[in-house]
Amino acid sequence: MKLTGAETLIRCLEMEGVEYVFGIPGGAILPTFDALYDSKLKFILVRHEQGASHMADGYGRSTGRPGVCMVTSGPAATNTVTGLATAHMDSAPMVCITGQVATTVIGSDAFQEADVIGITRPVTKHSYLVRDVKDIPRIVREAFYIASTGRPGPVLIDFPVDVSRAEAEFIFPDKVSIRGYHPVTDPDYAQVEKAAELIRHSKRPCLYVGGGAVGSGAQKEVVELVEKTGIPITTTVLGLGIFPENHPSSLRMLGMHGTHYANYAVQGSDLLIAVGARFDDRVTGKISMFAPHAKIIHMDIDPSSISKTIRVDAPIVGDIKSTLRELNKLVKDKRKDIKPWLDQIAEWKKKHPLKYDQSDDMIRQQYVIEQIGEITKHKAVVTTGVGQHQMWTAQWYKFMAPRSMLTSGGLGTMGYGFPAAIGAQLGRPGETVICIDGDGSFQMTMSELATAVYYKIPVKVFIMDNSHHGMVRQWQQLFYRERYSGSQLGPSNPDFIKIAEACGAMGIEVREKKEVIPAIKKALAHDGPVVVRCLVAKMDNVYPMVPAGHALDQVMDMA
Amino acid sequence: MNHTIAVLVENHFGVLARVSGLFSARGFNIDSLTVGETQDPAVSRMTIVVNGDERVLDQIMKQLDKLVDVIKVVDLTKEETIDRELVLAKVKASAASRADIIQIVNTFRAKIVDVNPHSMTIEVTGTESKLDAMLELLRPFGIDELVRTGLISVVRKKIISCGEPVPEQNSHPAKSKSKKVKEAKASEA
C-alpha cells in the first residue's frame, strides 16, 4: 500500500514506540499534522517551540527514551535551537522534526525558510534533510537509534513539504546499519585491569561520577563499586542521584558550588576515578591545579571526551555499565587500606558541613528546598532553571535516585525547568514532578502554564522569587564592586499568582517562613498544576564557592 | 606541525560542511582540502592538510570519527606515503623569456598546456617541495594566476578502505584486539 511521506513519518513514529509529540503546527509541516490527526500518538500543543524542545528533553532524560518534538519550518525550527543545544550539551536523547519548504524552492529565501540543517549542525548529534520519500523509514529508524545509543543526543529531521506529500510503498527496515556509526559498548579488558591495578595501589582514591553513568543506567554498578571498596564518591550536577546522597560514602556534589569535602577529596586524592564525566570547567576549577597529586582513570563512552581537557592515565572507552561490571569483579575492600584517608574525609565533613543562615525569619531558598526534599521523601523528579536556585537544589534536595534531577548543566539554559517538568511528568505519570525555578528563569518559558493546565499535567512549580537574576547579582556583588547592572527583576516582576490563576492553575503565595511547609503540602495535595511563589531572601549568596579560575580547594564560604 | 589526514565519508550532501565545521569551530585554518569519489561511488575521500597543536588535532580526529557520516579517519603524517599535488600556473612569457621557461619546465618534467603571445600555462604535479621549488624559479618571470589542487596522498603498504581493519583512529579500542591499539593506549598512559 502506498502512503504519503507524512503518513509514513507518523507511522514510523508509532512503530518506534513514541507516546507523545510536542510541538506547534504551521505551513510546511501541515501535511504531517494532517496525518497526525488520525494517529494514536498523543500530541501536546505548546505555546512556544522552545518549550516543545525542552519538554522532549525532559521526557527523554526522565525516561531514557528519546522525546519527540515536531514544529514547522523557519522561525519554529530556529526556536528549537536552544532546546537542541541544551540536549546536546547534556547528552539527552531527543528527536526533533522540523518542517521545511519544498525541495524545489530550498535556497530561494522562500517564506518561512531557514537553513535549519546548517544552523543546527553544531548542536545536534546528527541531522537529516529528507529528500526522497522512500528514505523516510530508514531515516526515522536511524534517528532514533543514533539519539538513544552511544552517547545519547538530539537528532534532527528536516522534512520538506513536497516530500511529505509524495507517495511511496511503506517498507519499515528490520535493521539499522550505519557504516560510520558504531558506538563502543564493551570496554578493553586490559584497560579495566589496569584501572583495577591503579585502584589496588591507591591510598587516597576518589570516585567522580557524572551524567554518563545515569545515561548508561549504571546505578546498581556504581553502588556496588562503592559498597565493595569503600571508596568515597562525589558526583557532578548531572550525576546527582546515581548514588544516594545520605550514604556515608557520599561526598555530594563537587565543583564551583560543591561541598568543601568533595573538592578537598578530589584535590587531595592520589587516584581520581572519573565515571561518565567530562571534566567541565565548572567541575575542575583552574585546570592546571586540578587534582594535582592524582592519577586519573577516565571511563567514558565517547572517545573524544578522553584527554580533552585533562591528561588521563588510564582511559577506558565503553559503556559505563559494562565497564563497571567488569571492574567490580576485580576490586576488593579497601576500607582498612585507606583508613587514614577516610578519617581525613570524615574530619573535613565534620568541619565543613553545608550550612546556611537560620538566625532570622527570612525565607531562605535552602530551607524551602530542604523542606521540599523532606516532604517528598527525596523521591520526586525535580527540574530546575539555572542560577542560585539550581545550585541550592543540587546542594539541599538530597537526591536518592538517578533521573530524578533534570537540569541544564552544560549549556546553563534558563527557562529549561518548567517545560522539562511537563515532559518529565508525561514520561513518568503518577510520580511527583517538581520544578524549582527562579523568578528570572520561570519568566523565560512561563507561557507553557497554559499547556500544563489544558492537558492537566500536575507539575508543581516553586518560584524562588528573590527579585533578581540572583547568580548574576552574586557575581556582581563579589567581583564587580556591587554594581548591579541589569540584574534587578523586582520592580518589573509580574504577579505570578495572578498569572497562574489567569491560566487556570492554582497559585500559592508564601510570604513567611511558617507558611513554607503548609504551602508545599497544599501544592502536593492538589491534583493539577500549581505555582508557589516564595518570597525569599534577596541578597543571599550560594556558598561554598570556588571563584572561576581558582583551584578547587580555594573555597569561599559564608562567614 | 603539518598533519595530513585522510577521511573516508559517505558521499552525501552536507558532509563537507560537517567536517569543515569541526575545524572552524576550533579556529583551525585548513591549509588544503581535497575531496572526490573513491572506487566505491557511495564513498568520498577527503585529504586534509592542517597545521596545529598535536593535542587539539587529536581532539579533532576523535570528533571527526564521531560524525555519523564519517566512516574512517586516518592520520597519514607518520605513514610512508605517496603525495601528489597539481598546479596550473599562468606565467608571463615574452619571446625573449620563453626559452628559459621551457627549460625550467623540462627540468621539472612539467607540461606546457597553453601558450599565447603574453603568457604560458604550465601544468605540473608532484610533492609540495617540488612544486614550491619550481614556482620559486618561475616567480621572477611573473606569475599571473596560480591554482593548486591541494594534496592527495596514499599510504604505500596499507590499504585504507571502509572494510579493512584499520590504524588506531577509527578502530574501537574495545573491539580491536590488535597489538597496535594497545601500544597506542599504553603510550597515551
Image (cartoon, rainbow, N blue to C red):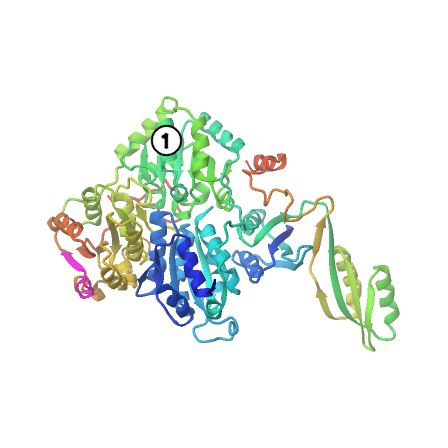
The residue drawn where x is 29% and y is 58% is: A441
Picture quadrant of residue A353: top left
Split into 4 quadrants, where in the image is the C terminus of chain A? top left
The residue drawn where x is 48% and y is 55% is: A172
The residue drawn where x is 51% and y is 50% is: A176
Vertical arrangement, residue A203 with respect to residue A455, above or below: above
Is B45 in the magenta? no
Depth check, front residue: A231 or A330: A330
Q: Is residue B60 left or right of residue A215?
A: right
Reading the image, the residue beneath label 1 is: A224
The residue drawn where x is 48% and y is 57% is: A137
Looking at the image, how many numbered discs can be counted on the residues? Answer: 1
Residue A417 horizontal/vertical position (percent): 30, 55
Question: What chain does mark 1 sit on?
Answer: A
Depth check, front residue: A548 or A213: A213
Secondary structure beneath label 1: helix
Residue B153 horizontal/vertical position (percent): 70, 53
Depth check, front residue: A511 or A361: A511
Q: Amino acid at mark 1?
A: Glu
Whether residue B37 can be seen here = yes
Specify the segment rendered in magenta. Answer: A499-509
Q: Is residue A423 left or right of residue A184?
A: left
Q: Residues within 10 Å of mark 1 (few under 14, many from 20)?
A: some
Vertical arrangement, residue A519 with respect to residue A338, above or below: below
Picture quadrant of residue A96: bottom left
Residue A75 horizontal/vertical position (percent): 40, 69
Q: Residue furthest top?
A: A336
Residue B118 horizontal/vertical position (percent): 81, 77
Whether residue A408 can be seen here = no
Q: Is residue B152 left or right of residue A414?
A: right
Is A502 in the magenta? yes
